[in-house]
């Protein structure tokens, strides 16, 4: 399954994101409020940003930043500034949402 801004079902995406937020709210993770913010930004950007693609076969997620035009290839690692400071970032949140989305849509 290959996902992009054109073929993603926004209703399912919103459902997956809401479930992720609930899971985070109930977690004891010390960075949970930052992850919740990251998930909220992630779900918006997956709908507004046309320049991303996700391949469910190899979990490859590539996105061009809306703000910096940098291209990020994201997995559990991300090359953005926030991730560099060991903080949650919206790119890794998007990657996780897409993994869950692909599993739910399969
Ligand atoms: Zn990032």
Image (spheres, grey):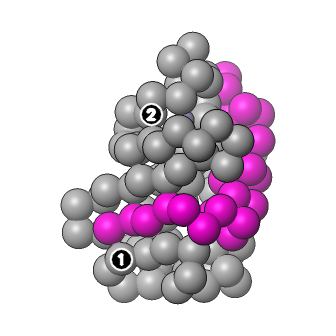
Marks 1 and 2 sit apart, C-alpha to C-alpha, by: 20 Å
Q: In this rendering, would 34 be left or right of 2? A: right
Residue neighbourhood size for the residue with mark 1, other residues' Cα within 10 Å, grouped as few (<14), some (14–19), many (≥20): some
Comes first in the chain, label 1 or label 2: 1
Q: Quadrant of ligand 1?
A: top right
Choose between 79 and 67: the one closer to the eye. 67
Give x and y (percent) for residue 36.
Answer: 73, 43
Q: Would residue 43 be seen by someone viewing this image from the given angle?
A: no
Residue linked to disc 2: 78
Residue wearing tag 1: 2
Q: Secondary structure at mark 2?
A: loop
- Does the magenta-highlighted stretch encompass residue 50? yes
Task: Give the magenta part as a residue range.
Answer: 29-55
- Percent x, y for residue 93? 57, 47
Q: Residues within 10 Å of mark 2 (few under 14, many from 20)?
A: some
Quarter of the rendering containing residue 32: top right
Q: Is mark 1 within 8 Å of ligand 1?
A: no
Instruction: Identify which residue is drawn at 23% across, 69% down.
Output: 57
Q: Farthest residue in the top direction?
A: 85
Residue 26 located left or right of residue 63 = right
Determine whether the residue tagged by mark 1 lies in a helix, strand or loop: strand
Q: Give the prevailing secondary structure in the magenta stretch.
A: helix
Figure check: 36 above or below 98 = above
Q: Which mark is residue 99?
A: none
Cβ of disc 2 within 8 Å of ligand 1?
yes
**Which residue lies at the image location 39% right of the left edge and 33% below the top edge?**
77
Asked if residue 92 lies in the magenta stretch, the reply is no
Residue at 53% from the left image edge and 29% from the top image edge: 80
Task: State the residue lying farthest toward the front.
Answer: 69
Side of 104 where 35 appears, left or right: right
As drawn, 23 above or below 101: above
- Whether residue 64 is visible, yes or no, is yes
């Amino acid at each position: 399954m290959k996902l992009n801004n054109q073929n993603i079902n926004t209703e399912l995406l919103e459902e997956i994101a809401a479930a992720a937020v609930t899971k985070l709210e109930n977690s004891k993770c010390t960075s949970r409020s930052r992850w919740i913010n990251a998930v909220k930004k992630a779900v918006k950007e997956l709908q507004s940003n046309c320049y991303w693609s996700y391949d469910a076969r190899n979990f490859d997620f590539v996105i061009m930043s809306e703000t910096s035009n940098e291209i990020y290839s994201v997995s559990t690692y991300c090359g953005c500034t926030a991730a560099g400071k060991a903080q949650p970032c919206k790119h890794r949140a998007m990657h996780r949402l897409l993994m869950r989305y692909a599993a739910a849509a399969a």
